[in-house]
Structures are given as structure tokens and as C-alpha cells.
Amino acid sequence: MFVTYMAIDERDGSREIGATVENPTWEQIEGSILRLDGQRMTQIVLGALEDDAFNEDHNMAIGGGGGVYTADVVLDGGASYVPVDLSKGTDDVTLIVGGQVAYRPARHCLDIQTVLQCAETFVRSGELDSTIQWEQM
């Protein structure tokens, strides 16, 4: 598996109570994604540790919850990608990501099945799922 590190953003009011997990299993990651509720637990970040440090240049952040999710991927070299559903509009959707209000175009908002598919491919290979359309940001 590519992912060897997971950071969970969870809050109790304004107090952060998140956790980090080294060498998470797919089941732990999937369970964390399913727990995203857009209020208390609003984001997880997945990536790899290199020399005991998180590689910020190659990771995936999944945020939101309650049926509406976002996924942002940064690949080596700094290129940033989001999955896109062109059947959805460009009107902004309001979400809570990382404990902060975020406004995303509807076409960047995912259902749970799509976000799990994106995540599983990234977790296992560190790559974008080729069956999903991506937009470079």
C-alpha cells in the first residue's frame, strides 16, 4: 500500500481532538471516511511518511460528510487534482472541511461511493483512479 499515514481532523466545539495513524489498513481508512459527518469529523488526510516526516507533496485530503464529500489530491511535483462530475453545476456548495467553512462548485462534490473509490485507488497505489474524471487545479 502507498499510504502509510492518516491524519484525522475531529473537533469537539473549537477543540481539536483528531488523531494520526501510522500504517493504517484500508478498513481503518474506509471507516474514517464513513465517519465524516461535516460537523465533528470533517477531514482526513492520507499520505506517506518519508524519513519519519509526512510527504506534503503527495497526499489526498477528503473532507465534508453527511452525503457530500470533497477529495483533493496533490501529486509529486505539486500538481493538484480534484474529481469532477460535469453533470453537476458550478453553483457553490457549502461544506465544513478541516473545521472551516468551504465553498466548492457542485461538480467537485462527491457521493460516498465515488469518494471511497477515489480513496481506495490512492491508498493502494498513490495514483488517481483512471475511471474517474479529474480536473487539474
Image (cartoon, helix red, strand yellow):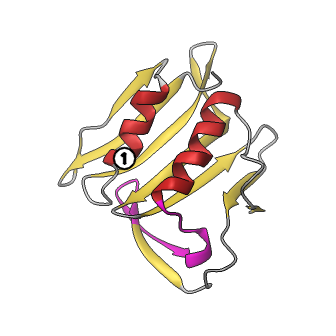
- The residue positioned 60% from the left and 32% from the top of the image is 123
- Does residue 47 appear anywhere in the picture? yes
Q: Relative to 69, does residue 24 appear above or below in the rendering?
A: above
Is the C terminus in the top left, top right, bottom left or bottom right quadrant?
bottom right
- The residue positioned 82% from the left and 41% from the top of the image is 77
- The residue positioned 70% from the left and 30% from the top of the image is 125
Q: Nearer the viewer, residue 40 or 55?
A: 40
When asked about the image quadrant of residue 107, the answer is bottom right
Point out the stretch of residues depicted in magenta.
96-111
- The residue positioned 67% from the left and 59% from the top of the image is 82
Residue 7: image x %, image y %? 43, 34
Q: Relative to 121, does residue 90 appear above or below in the rendering?
A: below
Q: Is residue 16 left or right of residue 79?
A: left
Q: Is residue 75 left or right of residue 69?
A: right
Magenta span contains residue 49: no
Q: Is residue 43 left or right of residue 37?
A: right
Q: Nearer the viewer, residue 24 or 5?
A: 24
